[in-house]
Amino acid sequence: MAMVLLLIAGSSLFLFAPTQSPTSPPVHDLTIPAGDPNWETACHSALIPDTTPACMQAALFDLNLARRTEGLPQLTLPQDFATFNQARQLVYLANNERSIRKLPTVVKSSPKLDHLARQAATQARDPFIPASMNGGSDWAGNFPNAIVVVFMWMYEDGYRYTNGGGGSNLDCQSPKASGCWGHRAVILEDSSTNTRYGAAFTTQLAPSQALKYADSYTLEFAGAPALFALGNTSQLAYTIVVIALLMILVSVASWFVRRHRRRDGRHMGPPSPPYLSWS
């Protein structure tokens, strides 16, 4: 039985673990080829959000350029994408990043998460996650549209970009800061069951934030805590290995006890003859 458990543990690592760790991405420092679009130069419209074709196409180009560095397929937007509001665009783009990495898409919203996302958007901060749920949340401000926001969260979220290229991850101010690539980890959240989303976009910020930010985006993925995260079976394998080793130790101890008893029996000699009564 212990050997069977060890085989199961090994199988869980090789058969079910993802081939690529979503939270350990390579460092990106994209160089846009000369003559190609770039969102920072193409998105200069006074519109908020900037949904002009030039800005949208440049943002999509940058996103697909980053994907190509990870060997991922390029994103082709659906024909009705422009009709989505910014919050819905965030969810669509985040789910696309999940699906190409073989993670389940989050298709259901949560009224509670939506409320928290809207509240946080007006205050220009990360939304709170309810104590009963497991997951994460992202915030971004002063970006032209949802494509740019997801591009920044997913592909320009590390220390090298933040400090070398004027990036905006406020939680990544040193190479080993826990916030580096933290926005990406939220999008690729996989530690919950029945995961729901909440998303919001606003230009109506609280007075204390209105002078600093023109707009604000928030996104949450959260659900009931999962005992073992889907696609990440290292915890399951570890638990199985511990159980199997305990079973082996118990079996070995039991074998030594039985062996010791048999040896004591041999040293005691033959049993005494039965008592015979005399009449």
Image (cartoon, rainbow, N blue to C red):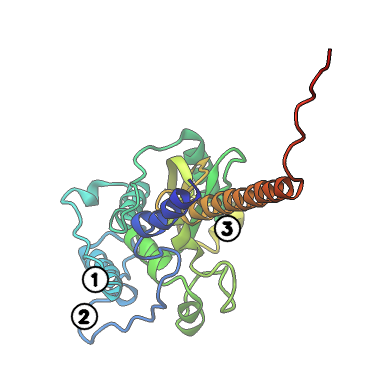
Residue 261: give x, y in percent of width and height: 71, 46
- Assign a secondary structure to mark 3: helix
Residue 206: give x, y in percent of width and height: 57, 51
- Report if residue 202 is visible in the image: no
**Which residue type carries mark 1?**
Phe
N-terminal of the two: label 3 or label 2? 2
**Residues tagged 2 and 1 counted as in contact (Cβ below 8 A):** yes
**In the image, which disc is placed on residue 160?**
none
Q: Can you identify the residue that label 3 sits on?
A: 209
How far is disc 1 from disc 3 in space, using C-alphas? 31 Å
Q: Can you identify the residue that label 1 sits on?
A: 61
- Assign a secondary structure to mark 2: loop
Q: Residues within 10 Å of mark 2 (few under 14, many from 20)?
A: few
The C terminus appears in which quarter of the rendering? Answer: top right
Depth order, front residue of 148/71: 71
Residue 66: give x, y in percent of width and height: 30, 73
Q: Residues within 10 Å of mark 3 (few under 14, many from 20)?
A: some
Compared to residue 43, the image places residue 86 above or below, namely above
Q: Residues within 10 Å of mark 1 (few under 14, many from 20)?
A: some
Residue 219: give x, y in percent of width and height: 45, 51
What's the residue at 59%, 41% (across, down)?
130
Depth order, front residue of 109/81: 109
Q: Can you identify the residue that label 2 sits on?
A: 36
Q: Quadrant of residue 68?
A: bottom left
